[in-house]
Image: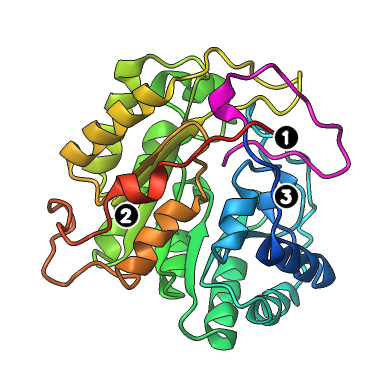
Amino acid sequence: MFPKVSGSEPIFRERKPPWLKVRAPGGERYTQLKETLRGLDLNTVCEEARCPNVGECWSAGTATVMVLGHTCTRGCRFCAVTTGSPRGAVDPREPDHVGRAIAKMALRYVVLTMVDRDDLLDGGAAHVAKTVRAIHRESPGLLVETLVGDFSGRTRDVDAILAAEPEVFAHNLEVVRRLTGTIRDQRCNYDQSLRVLQHAKAAQPARYVKSSLMVGIGERDEEVVEAMADLRGAGVDIVTLGQYLRPTPKHAPVKRYVEPERFEAWAEQGRAMGFRYVASGPLVRSSYHAAEAFVLASGGALPDRSPPLGPPDPGILPVESLVRRSVVER
């Protein structure tokens, strides 16, 4: 997952290039959703991560909700979420609460994400699955994306998520192969993540599978292309690429700010590889409403006529119409 900072910590600021500056979020829809989320006591990565796209996504009727608590059992060097031992604590009421709360927000698309929970026998898979079912029960027609951990590679836990029938199954590769051991927690593994994605696609070929990469953290351009090819080989349909931003001085430093032109080049290469959708840009995050708009436009499922690794559907919305955005000085 992309960098997250708890609301109580000071914001860490570094001088950034002009293409990373955005307008402060606002507007009637944004304000309404913000008040509703706080009133319903939901945890959103949108605010905790101080995501630069929060205004854009909320105004479009999408949001990312985090379940299974605030404490992650892993400690990746890009992520500032609290790390420690939750000691098996899980709120059994959370799935129903999330389902009812989301029903009050009139969303079109929700991303349901989680902290890693290695302290649980199933990594929290059953809890996530219950939450997906509660959302579908309370909000028929709402599309749900599950952005989950690797469950230590246990396919039975992946199957538990898939059985709840989210419209999109997502798991992030995060970084290129060479950087996995130094940037992600030692319990993470590049090939393990690929196997999780591959299993999800093979188990349910008609379901969208999605993954994301951060750049600017020390990778080489050719390594990004190699990682994209590995994701496509695993059957991933949707890929997002975005700029890594350092949440605090304790985290891995930014090695470079990647120019928008390079992101567009990667998008072109991704489309040539056969991804059904590529969202690539400095401000793109793993939960980004442009990619979600693609799923909404296609009805939440792959056409029956399309094989898992077939070419992109010519009827999909063009990437350029959803990903390109104006960057406004704050």
Q: Nearer the viewer, mark 3 or mark 1?
A: 3
- Mark 2, secondary structure of its residue: helix
Specify whether 157 is left or right of 209: right
Q: Residues within 10 Å of mark 2 (few under 14, many from 20)?
A: some
- Mark 1, secondary structure of its residue: loop
Task: Kindly identify which residue carries mark 1.
Answer: 80
Specify whether 329 is left or right of 236: right
Residue 308 x/y as whole percent: 18, 57
Q: Amino acid at mark 2?
A: His
* Magenta-span inclusion, residue 5: yes
Q: Amino acid at mark 1?
A: Ala
Residue drawn where x is 40% and y is 69% of the image: 167
144 vs 109, nearest the viewer:
109
Q: Which residues are magenta?
A: 1-21
Q: Nearer the viewer, mark 3 or mark 2?
A: 3
Residue drawn where x is 28% and y is 64% of the image: 203
Task: Kindly identify which residue carries mark 2.
Answer: 199
Residue drawn where x is 49% and y is 31% of the image: 282
Measure the C-alpha gap from mark 1 to mark 2: 29 Å
Residue 71 x/y as whole percent: 76, 48
